[in-house]
Image (cartoon, rainbow, N blue to C red):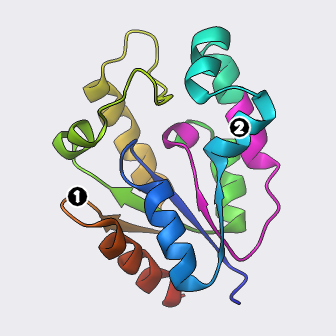
């Protein structure tokens, strides 16, 4: 098994978790979802953390969880807000190849039907469109490669991720 990690970043709804599982099977790698790690550490959903403890606490806990990772041979799905932490992103970069799942705003909006319960970090007074525009350059900055996942099936996106992973 190839020990390099594949780290997936991207907007909410881009398919990081869904495609990550499929991709891990294709590449014969483990799969790890950092959102689940945060929920397990905190004992509550991402949405509860945001509502009860606030965005600063959430961001700090996300960074701590990411920086605690010490794994190999894994497809890692991250939370969409991970790119707000340079420390977390530098750690992820040291662990493997970062692939950005690119999605246009309209497609993201269409895919996110459960914004109130899904644990999406919107900064104080920030609209979904502002969040999209604020995050876009950060995803581009950290990505080693990008995959356009709009109008694609999860299997097709996972296949494209796998091709990038195999060309390292």
Q: CA distance from mark 1 to mark 2?
A: 27 Å
Instruction: Determine the residue positioned at 71% across, 66% down.
Output: 95
Instruction: Tell me if 83 is positioned left or right of 70 in this view.
Output: left
Query: Which residue is denoted by mark 1 in the rendering?
Result: 150
Is 39 drawn above or below residue 96 in the view shown?
above
Pick whichever of labels 1 and 2 is earlier in the sequence: 2
Instruction: Determine the residue positioned at 22% across, 48% down.
Output: 104
**Which quarter of the rendered picture does the N terminus lie within?**
bottom right
Classify mark 2: residues with Cα within 10 Å, few (<14), some (14-19) or many (20+): many
Instruction: Tell me if 77 is positioned left or right of 126 in this view.
Output: right
What element does badge 2 sit on?
Answer: helix
Query: Which residue is denoted by mark 2 in the rendering?
Result: 38
What element does badge 1 sit on?
Answer: loop
Is 51 drawn above or below residue 49 in the view shown?
above
Is 88 drawn above or below residue 112 in the view shown?
below
Which residue is nearer to you in this view: 139 or 80?
80
Q: Residues in magenta?
A: 61-82
Magenta stretch: residue 128 in it? Answer: no
Instruction: Determine the residue positioned at 30% across, 75% down.
Output: 156
Magenta stretch: residue 67 in it? Answer: yes
Instruction: Tell me if 110 is positioned left or right of 141 in this view.
Output: left
């Amino acid at each position: 098994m190839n020990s390099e990690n594949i780290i997936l970043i991207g907007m909410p709804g881009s398919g990081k978790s869904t495609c990550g599982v499929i991709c891990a099977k294709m590449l014969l790698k483990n799969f790890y979802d950092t959102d689940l790690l945060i929920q397990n550490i905190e004992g509550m959903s991402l949405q509860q953390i945001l509502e009860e403890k606030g965005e600063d606490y959430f961001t700090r806990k996300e960074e701590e969880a990411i920086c605690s990772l010490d794994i190999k041979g894994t497809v890692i799905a991250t939370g969409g807000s991970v790119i707000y932490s340079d420390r977390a992103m530098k750690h992820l970069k040291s662990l493997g190849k970062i692939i950005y799942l690119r999605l246009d705003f309209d497609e993201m909006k269409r895919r996110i039907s459960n914004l109130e319960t899904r644990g999406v970090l919107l900064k104080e007074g920030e609209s979904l469109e502002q969040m999209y525009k604020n995050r876009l350059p950060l995803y581009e900055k950290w990505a080693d490669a990008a995959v356009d996942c709009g109008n694609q099936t999860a299997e097709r996106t996972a296949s494209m991720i796998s091709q990038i992973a195999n060309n390292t």
